[in-house]
Image (cartoon, rainbow, N blue to C red):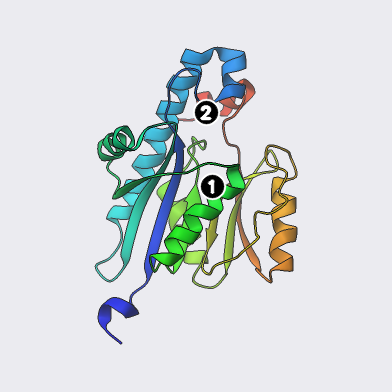
């Protein structure tokens, strides 16, 4: 086996929506207005990608790793320009369908490309740090599934070390049962999960308070 085929292949995929007024953060916009919600989305995305670039820069020479931006809300050429400005390795479309379909599409693409560990995150976590990403990938060395639980009953990160068909089927997206339903699906698929620390993502005006208080 060649050296290239014996190394660990990793993909870190950021699911992001173009931060334009009226096209992102609808729940936040209802309380703060479309323009302010879009600005918050832009800041969150910039913070997320800064942490991801740190992770990418820390990968050793023996690790074949990629930082991928999966975009919703932009045409392909504009999405590539945005991705170039954010310093990602690749910029792709999320494609159509619900969240489960879009997540599954990115995972299937990564497996086809030879990835051995895939971590997907959104751009809604103002406290995301390099250590969170390192813990997620380290967890995949021993667990088939890593989940970063969110305080609202969802999750802010999901990682897999092997394909898992139907993991996202029947998940009540947007509810407080997303994590619980995903854990049940994982049990059916014999995916013993590793859970990271519970965090608060930023979806509603009330979620801004901890962010404002943070250093």
* Residue 110 place in picture, x, y as percent: 43, 61
Asked whether the residues under the numbered discs 2 and 1 touch, taking CB atoms below 8 Å apart as contact, a structural biologist would say no
Q: Nearer the viewer, residue 106 or 89?
A: 106
* Residue 84 place in picture, x, y as percent: 25, 39
Q: Nearer the viewer, residue 141 or 11?
A: 11
Specify whether 37 is left or right of 61. Answer: right
Specify whether 28 is left or right of 44. Answer: right
Q: CA distance from mark 2 to mark 1?
A: 28 Å
Q: Which mark is residue 211?
A: 2
Q: Quadrant of the C terminus?
A: top left
Q: Which mark is residue 102?
A: 1
* Residue 40 place in picture, x, y as percent: 46, 23
Name the outermost residue toward the bottom.
1
Q: How many marks?
A: 2
Q: Nearer the viewer, residue 170 or 1?
A: 170
Residue at point 37%, 41% (across, down): 49
Q: Which mark is residue 35?
A: none
Q: Quadrant of the N terminus?
A: bottom left
Packing grade of label 2 (10 A; few <14, some 14-19, many >=20) is: some
Residue at point 74%, 51% (across, down): 180
Q: Secondary structure at mark 2?
A: helix
Nearer to us of marks 2 and 1 is: 1
Packing grade of label 1 (10 A; few <14, some 14-19, many >=20) is: some
Asked whether residue 73 is in view, the answer is yes
State which tag comes first along the sequence, 2 or 1. 1
Residue 16: name its quadrant: top left
Q: Is residue 208 above or below residue 2?
A: above
Asked whether residue 135 is in view, the answer is no
Residue at point 58%, 42% (across, down): 97
Q: Secondary structure at mark 1?
A: helix
Specify whether 19 is left or right of 147. Answer: left
Residue at point 26%, 81% (across, down): 3
């Amino acid at each position: 086996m060649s050296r290239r085929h014996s190394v660990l292949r990793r993909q870190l995929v950021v699911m992001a929506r173009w931060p334009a007024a009226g096209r992102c953060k609808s729940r936040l916009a209802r309380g703060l207005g479309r323009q302010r919600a879009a600005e918050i989305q832009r800041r969150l995305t910039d913070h997320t990608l800064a942490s991801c670039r740190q992770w990418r820069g820390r990968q050793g020479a023996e690790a074949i790793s990629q930082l991928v931006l999966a975009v919703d809300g932009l045409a392909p050429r504009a999405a590539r320009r945005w991705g170039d400005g954010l310093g990602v390795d690749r910029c792709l479309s999320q494609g159509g369908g619900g969240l489960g379909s879009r997540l599954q599409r990115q995972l299937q693409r990564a497996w086809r490309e030879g990835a051995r560990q895939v971590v997907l995150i959104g751009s809604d976590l103002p406290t995301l740090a390099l250590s969170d990403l390192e813990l997620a990938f380290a967890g995949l060395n021993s667990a088939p599934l890593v989940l970063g639980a969110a305080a609202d009953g969802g999750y802010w990160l999901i990682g897999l070390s092997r394909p898992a068909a139907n993991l996202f089927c029947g998940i009540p997206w947007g509810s407080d049962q997303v994590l619980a339903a995903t854990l049940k699906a994982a049990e059916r698929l014999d995916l013993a999960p590793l859970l990271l620390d519970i965090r608060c993502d930023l979806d509603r005006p009330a979620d801004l308070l901890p962010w404002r208080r943070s250093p």
